[in-house]
Image: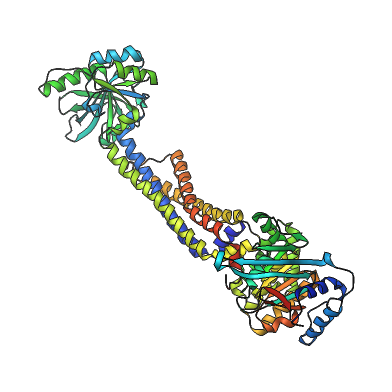
Amino acid sequence: MSTWNLNTWKISTKMMPETAKPETAKPETERSVSVTDTHKRTGSSPQSAQAKLVLNGVSHQYGDGESMLTVLDGLSCTVSAGELVAVVGPSGSGKSTFLSIAGALLTPSSGEVQIGGRSLAGLHARELADLRLHEIGFIFQGANLLPYLKVEEQLRFVAKLGRADKQQAARRADELLERLGLTARRRHYPDKLSGGERQRVAVARALMNDPSVILADEPTASLDADRGRDVTRLLAERVKAEGKAGVIVTHDERILPYCDRVLRLENGQLREG
Amino acid sequence: MFLALREIRFSKTRYVLIVTIMLLVSFLVLFVTGLANGLGNATSSAVRNMPADHFIVQKDSDDRFARSTLHKEQIDEARAVAGTQGAEPMGVQMTTVTKKDSDSKIDIALFGVQADGWIVPKTVEGKGLTAAGKGQVLADRNLADSGAAIGDTIVDTATGMEWTIAGYTENQSYSHMPAVWMNDADWAAYRSELMAARGGEADTSYNTIALRVSGDQVDQLNASLSDASVISKSQAIMAIPGHKAEQSSLLMMIAFLYVISAFVLAVFFYVITIQKTSQFGILKAIGAKTRYLAGSVVAQILVLSIGSLAVGVALVLVMKAMLPAAMPFSLGGDTVLLSCGLFLVVALVGGLVSVVKVAKTDALDAIGRAGA
């Protein structure tokens, strides 16, 4: 299975009917089954409308001339609504570059990126910022909350940036805090929270503006095994429940069971496995 | 504002410290400004408050009234261009007087003018100058501090001439001395006595001519006057003994205070901004625009500056009320507003470095980094 080329899994995911997707995070033992299922499930009607994140033939080089370094080399992938994908790979394999490109922070040297069905080609910096605000939810390493905002203000702030209706935003924040078990912590500053709670706030913040895509950059790096699993489980739950396309870039093997697919970044390409 | 205020709320100590510094600096700015104004008035208010726009002085007099001597021909020349109404001859002489039957000396500045001319200041108490009132003078109210009241007689120590204080005027000070105004007959008498006492020939000349003229007339006068030139009012004020030295040193202090406050703010906000670079990276990554973040920095600077200015102004006003009357301190509402406006501008200039830093922060910094 590790020898699958990119096109194979890309087509297979596109063909995969949404209803067949697991509703919640699966326990560890079912993981291999799910990958096999995915492989088997072909021939159904195409779900291209459900493909929230599409990277098509993306290449990226750093430097110029003789010292040119190719980090991504014709990378393609599609992540559908309700799907949580883990991207793993050794250091220096280009995970950060992949995430930056998928997150509309970096324009690739070549190739196309679509987020929420919209191509990023030719968008200006301001339009990209707007797109990140509304269509992408970021979860960074070590939470990266603003230290001077209380938990509920972290959420209200992103809603405010997105010019969301205040009452609607308040309802959304209440709901997210409830779902992520943070209601009792809503008036606390981040420095009064545990690492796991902070990362849960980051998950809530990422979901606040109802984006199409959730991108997580090593979200469990600073958490112990239990907390890491906790956060990932909650993230998987929200991704399924709200029909987001979720991508976790991680080193942490322990959270892979909660992901629908595991992609390995090697030689500038993504491979199933 | 959302971020700006919440950050101040969260890091109270840090912001209280910077507000304290700014408060002290703004207090000092306002205080020194008040002092400079007060001293400026003490040296020049008699000239500053004159309704004249130009003065004629003798050539090579360094623009100083006391060094200038003008004769009848020059007065006629000036009146030929400016008209009788546009040119008022004026004598200026600093001297020392004693109150009659008293030994304590008082330094005064004598102004000899035509009693019905427009140059005579407004009388605020007692009687004004009249052409007929021989020996009747109009004195600045500050003379009262030296014990000379209306109706008292003062004696000139150089000539022994006696004058009676007929009334008071206000804000008429020259080179830290209260001004005393007398009519042209008294001036002529005093002047010839003075010259006689000094052993020179009797001379009834004036020192300067106050003008109300247009720019064209200034050019004409400069061309037609013999051994005299036209100077502007501000030139005349700058030439008052002591004025320039006092004002320039105080102005330098004020300018330095502004520069210091700009730098203090610049350094403070720059250090804070550098500390927060990764936060700004995160905020940009999640879609905050540079404009919003820069606006947040500017909002903080404005909140802190306005806050410290408000307290600074309040302190200065309390200080002003407590100062002794003899202290030359003058701070009007418009000066306070101007200083505050300037302070805000300077604060914003200081914050510019941070705004640039915010603008340069790259959203990409957010990826692959641990910790905020």
Q: Position of residue B137 (x, y in %)?
A: 27, 23
Instruction: Compare residues A226 and A240 and report the one nearer the observer.
Output: A240
Quadrant housing residue A272: bottom right
Q: How many marks?
A: 0
Q: Is residue A237 above or below residue B290?
A: below
> At 80% across and 81% down in the image, what residue appears?
A35
Instruction: Compare residues B202 and B144 and report the one nearer the observer.
Output: B202
Left or right position of A197 against A64: right
Task: Give the quarter of the figure containing the N terminus of chain B.
Answer: bottom right
Q: Residue furthest front?
A: A66
Quadrant housing residue A101: bottom right
Residue B172 makes an appearance in the image? no
Q: Is residue A6 above or below residue B213?
A: below
Q: Residue furthest left?
A: B199
Q: In this view, does B197 lie above or below B323?
A: above
Q: Position of residue A160 (x, y in %)?
A: 68, 58
> At 77% across and 62% down in the image, what residue appears?
A116
Task: Give the quarter of the figure containing the C terminus of chain B.
Answer: bottom right
Q: Position of residue B36 (x, y in %)?
A: 34, 42
> At 32% across and 11% down in the image, what residue appears?
B80
Residue B24 makes an appearance in the image? yes
Q: Position of residue A21 (x, y in %)?
A: 84, 76
Q: Residue furthest bottom?
A: A29
Instruction: Compare residues B108 and B12 and report the one nearer the observer.
Output: B12
Quadrant housing residue B209: top left
> At 34% across and 39% down in the image, what residue appears?
B38
| Colour scheme of the picture | rainbow
Left or right position of B68 against B83: left
